[in-house]
Image: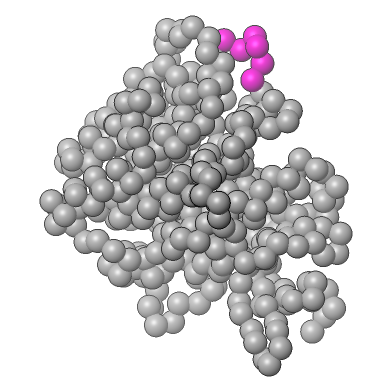
Amino acid sequence: MASDDVFGQKYVLLRKLAEGGMAEIFLARQIGIGGFQKELVIKRIHQALADNQQYVELFLDEARIAANLNHPNIVHIYDIGQAFSTFYIAMELIKGPDLADIAKKAMSHGTPLAPKWSAEILSQVAEGLHFAHNFRDKDGRSQQIIHRDISPSNILVTYGGICKLVDFGIAKAREQLHDDTGTLMGKLGYMAPELLEGSPADARTDLFSMGVLFYEITVGRRLFMGDDKTVARKILHDPIPPPSLWVEDYPSELEVIVMRLLERRPENRYQDANELHQDLRDVMTELGWPMGPVPLGRYLTDLFDLDAEEIDLDDVLMEEDDLGLDDDVELELGPDDPTLRGAPPAPPEEKEPEDEDELIFASRLPDPFDS
């Protein structure tokens, strides 16, 4: 075993799984006394960035916040530490793709991800979100944890059909949305209107992002496309076409849920993630759709053409820029920007219609569904 493979006192790095501009992810083995071994994932900051306090704080926020969120639909954090002049997080190993890859694979067969599977995935994610939103510390104080980066690359699904929310790196407990530099953090295409207007985030902010995600995976096209200014204008002002405009026979019961999630005014959306979870379960029951991890796991093994008895880590689809914070945008909220911070609404600009064949054929890019 090469000395470079030994990371700190407890871990052996087996191989690199992914690398982005901020961090690297490794398959690792935890080693202990009496022959104890456990496979997990090590996520570590590039040494060149280890002296950048802003990056380090964002990175460690993920561990500090998520380490206390013990829920089956949230990726577990086992350890946080410093070794070889950099920082690392040891986390649960997930054998399965992210939602961007699932949507991409479904589209490769000619249709978007079926509503019945989308509803199961989003229902599970809603359970994890509800737990995070309502988490209290040991003294019973609400921590007001908002994920603020709900997107397809931050939802992992095991081949057993269990959905896991990952990357709380820009979540903040009892803090304001903007970092110390005044920069708005997150993926612009999934941001709620109130964030662009400078209002604080709450649970309903994550639910708008859930609506964007839900819309995209079931329709097979990006909802808000264009450069940053165009996307911001679309989020704030442009009418949102119902999913049934793009997909024939889109379930009306599901469309009601999606469009409620996408209400621009937070008070018109779902008010908490549990309400969303319950509505999704009610629709799934009414329509006779399969529920629970087992049927979803069977679907995934069929979708990715895997032998359920021989699923190996090599089947996990991991590429560059799948580290959560790497694909955030940094949107400066300048006072002269007419689309941001509560400026009076501007009428939508005349624009060329988008290509109706603009479909989902890319993943793990700065905007996971851009082609």
Q: Which residues are magenta?
A: 333-338
Residue at 51% across, 44% down: 142
- The quadrant in which the N terminus is found is bottom right
Is residue 215 one of those drawn in magenta? Answer: no
Task: Give the image's coloring scheme.
Answer: one colour
Which residue lies at the image location 80% right of the left edge and 43% below the top edge?
53
Residue 363 position within the rendered picture, expressed as x and y whole percent measured from the top left: 51, 49
Residue 272, image x, y percentages: 36, 39
Q: Is residue 273 left or right of residue 325?
A: left
Q: Is residue 104 above or below residue 236?
A: below
Residue 370 seen anywhere in this rendered image of the structure = yes
Q: Which of 297 and 75 lies nearest the eye of the viewer?
A: 75
Above/below status of 192 relative to 15: above
Q: Against 105, is 56 above or below?
A: above
Please state if 3 lies on the left or on the right of 12 as rendered. Answer: right
Q: Kindly identify the residue that appears in the image at 48 percent across and 18 percent down.
A: 233
User: Going by the picture, which residue comes out furthest to the front?
Assistant: 139
In the rendered image, the residue lying farthest to the bottom is: 34
Q: Image quadrant of residue 311?
A: bottom left
Magenta region, main secondary structure: loop
Q: Nearer the viewer, residue 312 or 78?
A: 78
Which residue occupies the foreground of this view, 221 or 38? 38
Residue 175 sits above or below residue 217 on the image: above
User: What is the x, y in percent for residue 351?
Assistant: 43, 15
Is 370 left or right of 335, judged from the image as shown? left
Q: Which quadrant of the figure has residue 260?
A: top left
